[in-house]
Amino acid sequence: MSFFTSLSGMKNAQTDLAVISNNIANAETTGFKKSNAAFADIVATGGSTDPRQTPGIGASVQSITQDFALGALTQTGRGLDLAISGDGFFSAVHPVTGALTFSRNGALEVAGNGDLLDSSGDRLQGFPVDATGSPTSAVPASINIPIINAAGSGLSNVVINPQGVVGATYADGTSEPVAQISLASFPATGGLRAIGQTKWEATSNSGAPQYGNPGEGNFGQIRNGTLERSNVDLAEEMVSLLTAQRNFQANARALDTATAISQIVLNLQT
């Protein structure tokens, strides 16, 4: 029994090391959220078992959850770099599959056709606006910036204010609001499924996305020329790494001890 108990401890320590290693590897990944592993004990008992004589038979992985705490905001000076100062996610749609994903990485680009794209090339979602920049619909759609205005002048600059209103400036000096970036929130953020590239997708555990305007209600404001860094604390991760390593070593030593005891018993029998 002690063999399997020690083995479960080693496997759990290995899982913990994998989670911590992934956190450390992404310490400089924009918009990354660190993960934490939680474990639970395993106890095999029957109805007639004396609870005072139940040693337990090891441990198992209970959950690996992500910490969505705000990371440090770093100024880049680039106009299309955005960070959310508070709650909410950017939402984007894949141009081919139409898959809807969510991210805290606001490194944006303007495509040749005027589409506003995230760092993965997905189309950023926002609300249509009127001439004053006020939303005219509560249903998000892909943001497209006209490359040429009605007067025939070409696009010269794109500006995004703290409320997420995207403004286009043209060569003739005119400017006009194009859209307002929509932010998404979820009833249970911890239920989001990570899919890589600092993106998440909604699940039945997270609930359906709820959209709102930046700076209103529980949604954070948009910070222009800023990106959100990973929320990984390297000092904290190094301490956790040493703890996980010690746990692995201790379980390995327990396994060696169980092996030695078994060998002694076998020698006595012979």
Image (cartoon, rainbow, N blue to C red):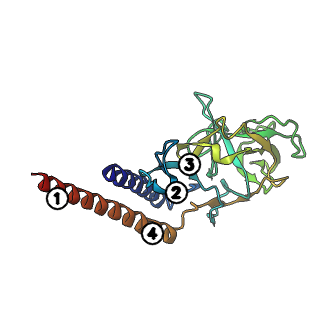
Which mark sits nearer the N-terminus, 3 or 1? 3
Q: Position of residue 39 (x, y in %)?
A: 50, 53
Q: Amino acid at mark 3?
A: Thr
Q: Secondary structure at mark 1?
A: helix
Is label 1 or label 4 in front?
A: 1
Q: Can you give x and y, in whole percent of width and height, for residue 14 in the image? A: 38, 54
Residue 26 position (above or below residue 143) = below
**Amino acid type of the residue that numbered disc 4 sits on in the rendered structure:** Met
Identify which residue, 174 or 251, lies in the foreground.
251
Q: Which of 236/71 is in front?
A: 236
Q: CA distance from mark 3 to mark 2?
A: 8 Å
Label 1 or label 4, whichever comes before in sequence order: 4
| Residue type (three-letter) at the residue carrying disc 1 | Ile
CA gap between label 3 and label 1 equals: 53 Å
Residue at (49, 58) in percent of width and height: 23
User: Dot 4 corresponds to which residue?
Assistant: 238
- Label 4 sits on a secondary structure element that is helix
User: Quick check: marks 4 and 3 in contact, CB under 8 Å?
Assistant: no
> CB atoms at circles 3 and 2 under 8 Å apart?
yes
Mark 4 nearby-residue class (10 Å; few <14, some 14–19, many ≥20): some
Asked whether the viewer can see residue 39, the reply is no
Residue at (45, 69) in percent of width and height: 238
Q: What's the distance in space between the residues labelled 1 and 2, CA to CA? A: 52 Å
Q: Between tags 3 and 1, which lies in front?
A: 1
Distance from the alpha carbon under mark 4 to that under mark 2: 18 Å
Q: CA distance from mark 1 to mark 4?
A: 39 Å
Q: Which residue is mark 2?
A: 29
Q: Which residue is mark 1?
A: 264
Check disc 3: other Cα within 10 Å, few if <14, some if 14-19, many if 20+.
many
**Which of the two labelled residues, at mark 3 and mark 2, occupies the earlier sequence position?**
2
